[in-house]
Amino acid sequence: MASAPSGLDKDQIFGMAEQEMEYRVELFNKLTKTCFDKCIERRFKESELNMGECSCVDRCVAKYWQVTSIVGQLLGSSRPPM
C-alpha cells in the first residue's frame, strides 16, 4: 500500500481533489457564460450556430484559456505580475 505524498492523509487529498473539481466547474461555467454572452445572438433564428458565431466562440474560448493559463502561471510563480 503506497503512502500519501508529503504526509497528506486520504481526507486531505480527497478535499484537495474536490476543491480542484469545483474550481474547474466554476471556470467552465464562467467560460461558457462569457463566450455565450459575447458571441451568440439573443434572437434564435436557427437551431445551430452560424459561421460567425462559431468563429467567435472558437476565438473566445482560445483567448479565455490563454489568459487563464497566464494568470495561473503568474499566481504559481513568486514573481509579481507585470
Image (cartoon, grey):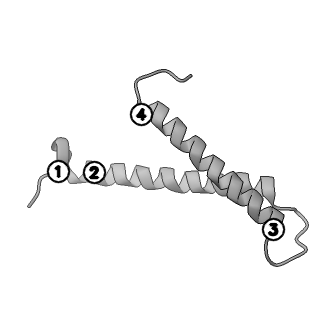
Identity, as a three-letter code, of the amino acid under mark 2: Ile
Residue drawn at 67 percent across, 58 percent down: 32
Q: Nearer the viewer, mark 4 or mark 2?
A: 4
Asked which quadrant contains residue 46, the reply is bottom right
Q: Is residue 58 left or right of residue 79?
A: right
Mark 4–mark 3 distance (CA, rounded to whole Å) = 37 Å
**Mark carried by residue 76:** 4
Q: Please give the residue where the numbered disc 1 appears in the rendered image.
A: 4
Q: Position of residue 24 (x, y in %)?
A: 50, 54
Compared across the picture, whether 52 is left or right of 23 comes to right
Label 2 – label 3 distance at C-alpha? 44 Å
Mark 1 or mark 3, whichever is nearer to me: 3
Q: Which amino acid, by three-letter code, is at mark 1?
A: Ala
Q: Quadrant of the C terminus?
A: top right
Q: Compute the Cα span from label 1 to label 3.
A: 49 Å
Give the residue drawn at x 39%, y 54%: 18
Q: Secondary structure at mark 4?
A: helix
Q: Quick one: 39 or 10, which is closer to the camera?
A: 39
Marks 4 & 2, CB-CB < 8 Å contact: no
- Other residues around mark 1 within 10 Å, as few (<14) / some (14–19) / many (≥20): few
